[in-house]
Image (cartoon, grey):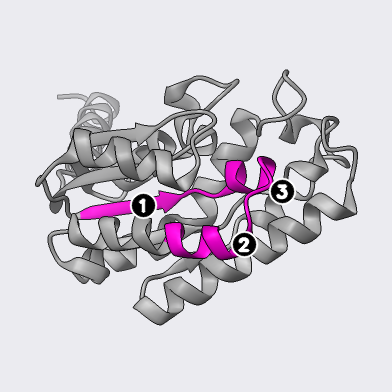
């Protein structure tokens, strides 16, 4: 064999070996290390009004979990635009019954505020909703988290109303206090929603509800906290 042919042959063998090593080190799809069931309770902010259900934060959250090797095998959404706390609780009792889930989220209250319900009545009804969430979590409080109520004052519809924002703050203070009292994580997404007037992409085409972009930011902001929570289940 001539020298230059030998060198070429040797290079081919080396290249093949390197390619083989690279192939063996190529990341493959990560199989789930944990599989969970998930129940999402809420209103328009959970169901994804004006953006489509699959663009709402609970669905985006599931994608984030999947990318971190946590699969959601059983998902149930009990949420509807316009629901108050009492309406959510009534419907949840009918739909969920005695079923329990590994993970349960709760985001409710904006329609109580919008319809002028008193903070006192909201406090009682929100407590009932959170109790329901805890009862339907397989490991109780460990598997539940609450999201704060977004502020629709920061939309073209809300026109920057300070009165709306003050009421949302009052309702969120109730949600946070009750969540902490029960030992349930409370994730504040209200600050994100308050960018709606400075950034039009945060608001959906109806000029009231959050856009798909905002839903994604909500989900990303809580993802790793939720992952840490799931790992403790």
Q: In terms of secondary structure, where does tag 1 sit?
A: strand
Q: Could you say which disc has been placed on residue 119 in the image?
A: 2
For the residue pair 72 and 6, the one nearer the viewer reads as 72
Mark closest to the chain's N terminus, 1 or 2: 1
Q: Which residue is mark 1?
A: 105
Say whether marks 1 and 3 touch (CB < 8 Å). Answer: no
Q: Quadrant of the C terminus?
A: bottom left
Q: CA distance from mark 1 to mark 2?
A: 21 Å
Q: Identify the residue at horizontal 56%, vertical 69% (top origin).
A: 174
Residue 44 locus on image (x, y percent): 53, 32
Q: Could you say which disc has been placed on residue 16 in the image?
A: none
Q: Identify the residue at horizontal 18%, vertical 34% (top origin).
A: 13
Q: Quadrant of the N terminus?
A: top left
Is 7 left or right of 32, judged from the image as shown?
Answer: right
Residue 75 locus on image (x, y percent): 23, 36
Q: In terms of secondary structure, where does tag 2 sit?
A: helix
Q: Could you say which disc has been placed on residue 151 in the image?
A: 3
| Residues packed near mark 1 inside 10 Å, few (<14), some (14 to 19) or many (20 plus) | many
Query: 161 above or below 191?
Result: above
Q: CA distance from mark 3 to mark 2?
A: 16 Å
Q: CA distance from mark 1 to mark 3?
A: 19 Å
**Residue 137 visible, this orientation:** yes
Q: Which region shows up in magenta?
A: 103-126
Q: Identify the residue at horizontal 79%, vertical 60% (top origin).
A: 166
């Amino acid at each position: 064999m001539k020298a230059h042919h030998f060198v070429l042959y040797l290079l081919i063998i080396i290249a093949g070996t390197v390619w083989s090593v690279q192939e063996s080190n190529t990341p493959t799809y990560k199989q789930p290390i944990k599989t969970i069931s998930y129940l999402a309770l809420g209103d328009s902010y959970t169901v994804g009004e004006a953006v489509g259900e699959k663009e709402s934060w609970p669905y985006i959250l599931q994608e984030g979990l999947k990318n971190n090797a946590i699969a959601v095998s059983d998902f149930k959404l009990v949420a509807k635009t316009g629901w108050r706390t009492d309406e959510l609780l009534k419907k949840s009792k009918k739909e969920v019954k005695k079923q329990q889930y590994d993970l349960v989220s709760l985001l409710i209250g904006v329609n109580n505020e919008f319809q002028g319900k008193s903070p006192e009545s909201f406090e009682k009804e929100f407590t009932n909703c959170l109790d329901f969430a805890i009862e339907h979590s397989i490991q109780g409080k460990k598997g539940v988290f609450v999201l704060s109520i977004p502020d629709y004052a920061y939309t073209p519809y809300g026109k920057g109303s300070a009165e709306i924002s003050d009421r949302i703050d009052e309702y969120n203070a109730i949600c946070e206090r009750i969540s902490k009292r029960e030992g349930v994580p409370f994730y504040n997404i209200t600050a994100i929603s308050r960018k709606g007037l400075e950034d039009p992409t945060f608001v959906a085409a109806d000029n009231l509800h959050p856009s798909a972009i905002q839903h994604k930011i909500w989900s990303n902001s809580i993802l790793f906290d939720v992952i840490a929570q799931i790992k403790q289940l």
